[in-house]
Image: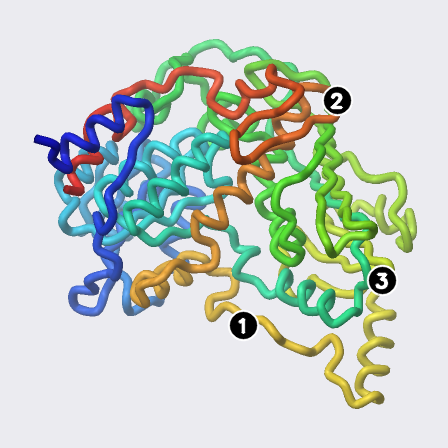
Amino acid sequence: MITRRNFIKGTAAMGGLMFLPSCATAKVKGINGKMNIAVVGAGGMGYAVFNYVRKAKNVNIVAICDVDRVRAAKAIKEFSDVPFFEDYRVMFDKMGKDIDGVTVSTPDHMHYPISAWAIANGKHVFCQKPLTRTIWEAEELKRLAAEAGVFTQMGNQGHTHEGWRMIREWYEAGILGEIEDIYMWTNRPIWPQGYMEPPAGEKVPPTLNYNLWLGVAPYQPYNHEILPFKWRGMRNYGTGACGDMACHFFDAPYSAFDLGFPEVIKGNSTPFNNYSWPKESSTDMIFANKRGKGGKIKVHWYDGGRKPAHVKGVDDAYIHDKKNANCTLIVGSKCTVRTNEYGAGGETFIFPKTKMRDMLVAAKKAGKNGLADKKYERSKHMGNPVMEWVDACFAGKNPPGNFNYAAPFTEMCLLNMIAINFPDRELKYDPKTLSFPGCPEADKYVRSLYDYKEEFLPEKKGIFSNLF
């Protein structure tokens, strides 16, 4: 006899998990009018979660989970009556029935397993950017969340801001003309990256559960140079400068112009190895897009201090001014738009500002709203993706930054990290097969370069059957 539980186990054995419909409750129960949230990762951006919900009357923190008691100390002290856990798996076992949603604010390599474990327990999930460390993980989270019927959000402040909405409105009003080029650059990394070797091992602090911090990653001796922040440049744990910041920078043009996936991508960088990402990198991407000149939009990414030599219509002095260490310039056939890495409305304007002022004056004289038209609804929680997610959960719908959006967006950003493994070689990517036609040697980078430790994966522990 084929039961729902046996069906799940069977599909898992075939290398993938499949949910049957209606396996999770959609709306938050909202007992006492509040959403019960478990916070996984309580330091850094994890602590920011507490600030996001601090004034909310419809949120209740019911569990705190962190492998590092020093990083979590502030949260533990402030929420002394809230149960604390080191292991997210234990937290779900003991408190699963009391949790509505989970926030995941850990190093990148643990985003997928923790989010998947939460989904397997029928919980709504908020996960910081980048959504995952690999393309395959992003696809899996998108699929699992959709099939489980949970509501999700990637922690990207920029997507809650109005910058991308303004740019889209300006384009559709004919103000920008055809989109020609998009340039983005960042001063990251501000942590060690380059051709590095693992540091010598040190004694693990008694306040840190290092094995849980490693999670799915292979063993490497503890060193304070990696934890708690500098893991971003290490390939086993982070996604480097581009992976960290591209999910901010790319959001405005990606959302404004529906970029999708590039037809071609080409990258290069300073030397790096399988241990660490490079100090500097840059990539060029070409998107087939009806909004582009000749049906194409060219996108250029720079990190590690690299910048474009020239941008049409922009003074070179502006580009190389140290005050403009992080910048996005969108070049249209009629004018250029400047925004910052978060796509904030106040930082988004027609370049230079004097030209924008002249355009506003001209529109007013013509009796038109012009740049002031607001066609697309603004978020009620600009700069606060957590509360946007909370409200969506109560409303019984996915917020704008849900995994259906966040997964392909993250995948597109991570393509930059694959391209630099093949310097100055044009790569084509097929998102349907998660492969690179003409360059099969690039396919291995779609997944992790190491085997995950199975005890941290819900599908290996049969956890997904708990939903049925």
Indicate the amino acid at tag 2.
Answer: Arg
**Residue positioned most to the front:** 1
Task: Give the secondary structure at mark 3.
Answer: loop
Residue 193's disc is none
Q: Please say whether residue 75 is visible from this viewpoint.
A: no
Indicate the amino acid at tag 3.
Answer: Cys
Residue 267 figure quarter: top right
Image location of residue 208, percent across then percent down: 32, 27
Residue 377's disc is 1
Relative placement, left or right, of 324 versus 382 is right
Along the viewing direction, whichever of 465 and 79 lies nearer the viewer = 465
Mark 2 or 3: in front is 2
The first of marks 1 and 3 along the sequence is: 3
Image location of residue 341, percent across then percent down: 65, 51
Relative placement, left or right, of 348 versus 414 is right
Where is mark 3, residue-wise? 335
Is the residue marked by circle 2 packed among few (<14), some (14-19), or many (20+) residues within 10 Å?
A: some
